[in-house]
Amino acid sequence: MVAYFKLQNNLFMVGGGLLGFLLALLNYAGLSERGSYATVFLIAMYVFAGVIVGRVASSFFANRRVKAMTALLYQEGKPAEFLEKFEPLSDKVPDNVVEYVDAKNKVAYAYEALGEFEKGLAVVDALKPEELKLHSLAGTSLTENQRMRFYLLSGEIEKAEGQLERLKELQEEAEGRANTLAKNLQECVRLAGNWLNFLKGEEYDSAYIEEEIRYAGNRIHKSEMQLLLARMNHAEGREEPARALLQEAAETGAGLYAGAEATKLLEVWS
């Protein structure tokens, strides 16, 4: 997380080094008894230890700041407020590290939540996670899955079909190499496949979408899944469950794209 706060990190490490140096001076009498070379070495160790302490402290405070901002997006469902605070910060992260890719995907997800799909897709298209020296596969998977969500939400079936194949390729690449990532991609492929099949008028598993709603960890995803399941029920002629889900989506997604869409459909389907 310190990549988000480079200046803070540098200041903490410099401060830690100075504190270490001061502690060495306070203990100089004892250190000097060991001889000049040993004294210089021990002072350097004090400074180095101080730098490490500063780095740890910087990481702690950086984590707290980032978690507070991401809570606006995932827990509180306030993408506009999140973008105002986080997007300028994401621009300061070096673009050759996975933290940058992660940050920009969070920005894209916030645009998704607001229904600004073109803006979000532009953020994703500007990323080049495959060029990362470290965690390239994880960064690419995150980016390609976010791109898939934009295609599905926009109803771009042809692009979504190609994107689903891309996710399957990434899942295959991750198997045996990054098992946790492979499992996550498996779930992404399953969700995307069901969503795409519904858009194409083919067989889908609505029970899986119900699971997604039950276990959704944030308001954005939950409201989008409620909206999707409502559309599935409506297509099956199950009007009452469809309207009930729209009402839930309107409440869960208040101030979000899915909530606004649910409200519109409630008027149309009444």
Image (cartoon, helix red, strand yellow):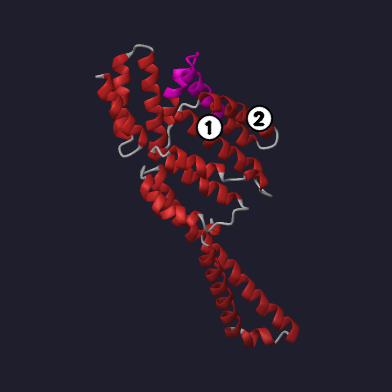
* Viewer-closest of 6 and 59: 6
Q: Identify the magenta region.
A: 188-210
Residue at mark 2 to residue at mark 1: CA–CA distance: 14 Å
Based on the displayed image, in which of its 4 quarters is residue 2 positioned?
bottom right
Residue at 54% x, 47% y: name it: 102
Amino acid type, label 2: Glu
Name the residue beneath numbered marker 2: 169
Left or right of residue 110, residue 98 in this image: right
Q: Main secondary structure of the magenta part?
A: helix
Q: Tell me residue 191's x, y (percent).
A: 51, 26
Residue occupying the point 30% across, 15% down: 239
What residue sits 51% from the left and 43% below the top?
Answer: 122
Tag 2 and tag 1, C-beta contact below 8 Å: no
Badge nearest the viewer, 2 or 1: 1
Question: Disc 1 designates what residue?
Answer: 148
Given residues 162 and 58, the one toward you in this image is 162
Residue nearest the viewer, comparing 113 with 210: 113
| Residue in the picture at 53% in, 60% down | 59
Please tell me whether residue 76 is drawn above or below residue 65 in the rendered image: above
Instruction: Pick the quarter of the image with the C terminus.
Output: top left
**Residue 195 in view, yes or no:** yes
Is residue 209 shown in magenta? yes
- Relative vertical location of residue 220 with respect to residue 16 in this rendering, above or below: above
Residue 35 in sight in this render: no
Q: Name the kind of residue labelled 1 in the image.
A: Met
Tell me, for residue 112, which label it has, or none: none
Task: Answer left or right for 189 relative to 232.
Answer: right
Which numbered disc flags the more N-terminal residue, 2 or 1? 1
Local packing at callout 1 (Cα closer than 10 Å; few below 14, some 14-19, many 20+) is: many
Residue lying at the far top of the rendered structure: 237
